[in-house]
Image (cartoon, rainbow, N blue to C red):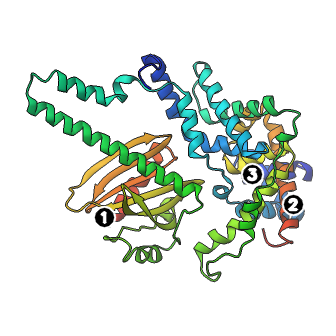
């Protein structure tokens, strides 16, 4: 175990890397899940991302590490799966869909458990609709709405000017909202 | 400004990404253009309907472990406590009493480390099993009584919504094979589990911040309770949570 591994400085570097990078695992994993078709592809891409990031950790110049990691993840996804049909999102598995269609067992007249439970169904729909967006719009939507990145950070991740981020976000939101209204039957999103 | 420009910039306005000058320009256009005003309202409503916390995917524990396993391990001196103990046992020409005292200390630390691991596992389980709450409610007066009869103590359930931590509900969980209360909060897209276990007769212990598997854990003892707050939010915010919770508890 620890014995054969790494001398002190490598261990120290790894500790520092883990401390900085691991708290963002869910954000990285989320982008991978939205970009790739299967969960196992997402697992592999995230692992590859962390190993690459660690390999290049010496060249990391400080500042927020989250966009840096997300950019690496995105490169991994594109390198491994570019031109491959897997770089599209597949609808959630059947079991998850079944769950979402089940009637909530909670009372519907109560107030806040309530929204939580009712929103589970809505969230499944929203996940699916985001997944159906074309990749260039999907990634900016995920980075902005779910991963909570600033425009500047999104521009870093997708290696594009801020103007591109803005126009894709505007267009992506419009597509998503139209799809949402169609899916929820013109309700009140 | 024309409608085409406004249709893009209104998103930046919603996101708070415009400087004062541009924000004024967009607002001026919207004030005179009912069409764009309606768009702004629609997208604001749509944005409110999105619940980022529910759209996030939680990485499986197996993936987390796999990644940690592939990175170089921490330095041997820090991790291999057993050899420390052995070293003392072998070279124990010195006071046996002192050595055994140290042994107890080392073992206690191991015990705390194990419980820390259990607390983090419980946190992860709650995120993955879609079983965050047994009693989902933002009303502390609903959550608190729910624990009656399920635990030996009444856990402190405090609504911190006004302080930026939304109460999501409560859950019964297990740590160290004993039932504990888990009180669940949300900060933006992040979940905080606050675990409370009875610790009868324990004296007040000041808080300690530790991290494991990329999660932060703030633990402290107060009012005969051991408390652990676990989350992936950064240490500063988790400290803020702990301090606000403690302050509210004293009121």
Q: CA distance from mark 1 to mark 2?
A: 49 Å
- Front: mark 1 or 2: 2
Say which residue label 2 marks: A179
Give the side of residue A168 with respect to residue A28, left or right. right
Q: CA distance from mark 1 to mark 3?
A: 41 Å
Report which quarter residue B32 is drawn in. Answer: bottom right
Say which residue label 3 marks: B13
Rendered location of residue A63, percent (x, y): 58, 30
Rendered location of residue B44, percent (x, y): 75, 61
Q: Secondary structure at mark 1?
A: helix
Chain to which mark 2 belongs: A
Rendered location of residue B228, percent (x, y): 38, 53
Q: How many marks?
A: 3
Q: Which mark is residue B250?
A: 1
Rendered location of residue B139, percent (x, y): 49, 74
Q: Are marks 1 and 3 on the same chain?
A: yes
Residue B30 vs residue A161, the one in the foreground = A161
Q: Secondary structure at mark 3?
A: helix
* Residue at position x 67%, y 55% in the image: B52
- Front: mark 1 or 3: 1
């Amino acid at each position: 175990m620890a014995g054969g591994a790494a001398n002190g400085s490598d261990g120290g570097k790894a500790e520092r890397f883990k401390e900085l990078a691991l708290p963002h695992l869910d954000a990285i994993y989320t982008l991978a899940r939205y970009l790739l078709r299967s969960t196992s592809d997402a697992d592999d891409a995230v692992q590859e991302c962390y190993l690459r990031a660690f390999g290049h950790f010496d060249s990391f110049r400080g500042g927020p590490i989250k966009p840096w990691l997300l950019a690496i993840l995105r490169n991994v996804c594109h390198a491994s799966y570019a031109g491959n049909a897997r770089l599209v999102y597949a609808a959630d598995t059947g079991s998850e869909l079944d769950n979402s269609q089940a009637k909530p067992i909670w009372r519907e007249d109560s107030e806040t458990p309530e929204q939580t439970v009712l929103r589970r169904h809505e969230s499944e729909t929203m996940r699916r609709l985001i997944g159906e967006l074309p990749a260039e719009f999907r990634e900016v939507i995920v980075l902005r709405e779910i991963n909570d990145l600033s425009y500047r950070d999104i521009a870093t991740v997708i290696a594009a000017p801020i103007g591109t981020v803005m126009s894709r976000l505007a267009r992506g939101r419009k597509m998503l909202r139209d799809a949402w209204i169609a899916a929820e039957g013109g309700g009140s999103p | 400004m024309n409608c085409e420009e406004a249709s893009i910039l209104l998103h930046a306005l919603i996101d708070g990404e415009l400087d004062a000058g541009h924000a004024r320009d967009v607002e001026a256009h919207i004030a005179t253009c009912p069409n764009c005003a309606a768009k702004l309202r629609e997208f604001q409503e749509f944005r409110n309907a999105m619940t980022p916390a529910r759209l996030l995917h939680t990485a499986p524990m197996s993936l987390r472990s796999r990644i940690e396993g592939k990175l170089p391990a921490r330095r041997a001196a820090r991790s291999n406590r057993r050899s420390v103990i052995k070293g003392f046992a072998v070279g124990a020409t010195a006071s046996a009493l002192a050595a055994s005292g140290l042994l107890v200390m080392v073992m206690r630390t191991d015990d705390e480390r194990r419980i820390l691991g259990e607390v983090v596992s419980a946190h992860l389980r709650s995120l993955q099993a879609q079983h965050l709450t047994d009693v989902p409610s933002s009303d502390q007066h609903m959550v608190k009584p729910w624990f009656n009869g399920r635990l030996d103590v009444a856990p402190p359930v405090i609504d911190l919504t006004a302080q930026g931590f939304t109460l999501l509900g409560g859950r019964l969980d297990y740590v160290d094979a004993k039932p504990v209360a888990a009180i669940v909060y949300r900060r933006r897209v992040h979940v905080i589990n606050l675990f409370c276990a009875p610790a009868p007769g324990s004296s007040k212990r000041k808080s300690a911040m530790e991290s494991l598997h990329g999660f932060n854990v703030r633990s402290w003892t107060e009012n005969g309770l051991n408390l652990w707050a676990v989350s992936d939010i950064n240490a500063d915010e988790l400290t803020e949570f702990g301090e606000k919770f403690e302050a509210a508890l004293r009121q």
